[in-house]
Amino acid sequence: AMFDSLSSSIQKAQRLIGKSGTLTKENMKDPLKEVRRALLEADVSLPVVRRFIKKVEERALGTKVLDGVTPDTQFIKTVLDGVTPDTQFIKTVLDGVTPDTQFIKTVSNELIDLMGGGVGAKDLEPGFPQIILMAGLQGVGKTTAAGKLALYLKKSKKSCLLVATDVYRPAAIDQLVKLGAAIDVPVFEMGTQVDPVEIAKKGVEEGRRLGVDAVIIDTAGRLQVDEDMMGELRSMKAALRPSDTLLVVDAMTGQEAANLVKAFNDQVDISGAILTKMDGDSRGGAALSVREVSGKPIKFVGVGEKMEALEPFYPERMASRILGMGDVLTLYERAESAIKEEDAKRTVERMMEEKFDFNDFMAQWKTMNNMGGLQMLKMMPGFNKISEKQLYEAEKTFEMYEAVIKAMEEEERSDPELLVKSMARRRRVAQASGRSEADVAKLMGAYTAMKSQMGGMSKLLKLQKAGADPS
Ligand code: GDP
């Protein structure tokens, strides 16, 4: 898939750095060469690559990074340990910062920067109604993207009207009408005998009459950039004053896509790009270069032919995907909304007291479920390749844990030692839960492992509280 070879080259660069010593100009030389080669191979242009490498080198020599560890990441790590042994990244974070992680962190920051991180809104511009003009060459996926965007807005509770203005290709109008019907969004069209700018104006009027939140205008595509197309877009922009003018480009075309965004922006001033076909097997140069080459952000990416296959573009997430770090940011975001502050505080307090019982176990399991259950493991570093079967098995195991814990008496839940000590109790719990004694033994094993890891965690927390350097 996209970025696979870039990911493995950067990971190789990371390994070349090693875990001991410090970052120096000398030991970064070969790893940087590797990154440079990988970027060029991903079809990023030479000047962009040069600037990138220079920045990584400068920043890496001047940074000191320390990632914090929270009880929740510790819990996740513990769960991960039970599922598969590959927890390299998290372990590295937990173990403190080594030159290789420092290097990769710098590469990550620069990738985010390159793709336009932290540069204001990457979502659509506001407007009442929002008027979104879609431009692009033929075959890049423009009409599909118009439909996807309508569905995306609809899902965020915004009503839409699609407007078909490609009077040169009746098939394009039919296609939009069909897409609209499929996603239940109205489509405005006036056939092929009316001037496109006139259709667009009437479309916006219709949108106001219907009271929709957004009007999405699909303009005519051409085989290549020509003066007619640019002229038509300029007239549309002048007549409609759209809140967004989005250029749809095909990710498979690499550097060329970035150049196209620049060319359009120079001539008609667009607000951003939609990069389609990111699901395809291409090298990723487009995603990496659009911002740097054109000065405009990528706002959305198309990741498949289905109408649902559109995602807002987040440079941070893309960077962590490229680096094979999983979708950590999405995960943290979910964690933030799933974990209530008082719960988190309680967890930390319990941990400081080195207490961990089955009530805590269940509470943390509930938090995991609020975050999307074990499916979220797919977003974890090193877990991109976890199979559905493994997930299924892990979920079954946790269901079993839950059943067994529910069958315990309250005093056993809050004092697991009672069960550790008494075979009779364990047998009774097995019977009451309808599970086997081996199942109960498995839960006891998981509990003991977690408790000891939580113990280690508490020592770390105490050190941090005391102001000591935990590494
Ligand atoms: P237009 O000429 O620019 O309007 O292009 P279309 O919207 O008709 O799309 C051209 C082809 O690309 C169609 O077969 C779409 O299904 C396909 N397509 C569009 N977006 C994507 C995408 O994100 N991923 C994949 N795999 N195919 C896409």
Image: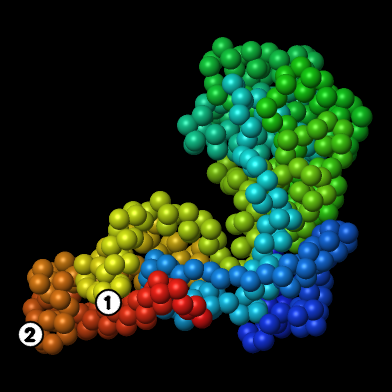
Q: Residues within 10 Å of mark 1 (few under 14, many from 20)?
A: some
Q: Is residue 105 above or below residue 417?
A: above
- Residue 175 visible in rendering: no
**Distance from mark 2 CB to nearest ligand 1 atom below 8 Å:** no
Left or right of 392, for residue 313? right
Q: Locate residue 315, reporting x and y percent.
A: 65, 53
Choose top left, top right, bottom left or bottom right for residue 185: top right
Choose top left, top right, bottom left or bottom right for residue 64: bottom right
Element assignment for label 1: loop
Write the residue at 84% across / 42% down.
Answer: 262
Q: Is residue 274 above or below residue 218?
A: below
Q: Residues within 10 Å of mark 2 (few under 14, many from 20)?
A: few
Task: Give 329 or 120, whichever is nearer the viewer.
Answer: 120
Separation of marks 2 and 1 at Cα, in angstroms: 27 Å
Q: Locate residue 336, reporting x and y percent.
A: 42, 54
- Please give the count of numbered marks on the rendered protein: 2
Task: Give 200 or 293, whichever is nearer the viewer.
Answer: 293
Left or right of 256, for residue 439? left
Q: Which mark is residue 424?
A: 2
Q: Which residue is mark 1?
A: 354
Mark nearest the camera among 2 and 1 is 1
Write the residue at 54% across / 34% down.
Answer: 153
Q: Which mark is residue 105?
A: none
Q: Locate residue 419, reporting x and y percent.
A: 14, 81
Quadrant of the image containing the N terminus: bottom right
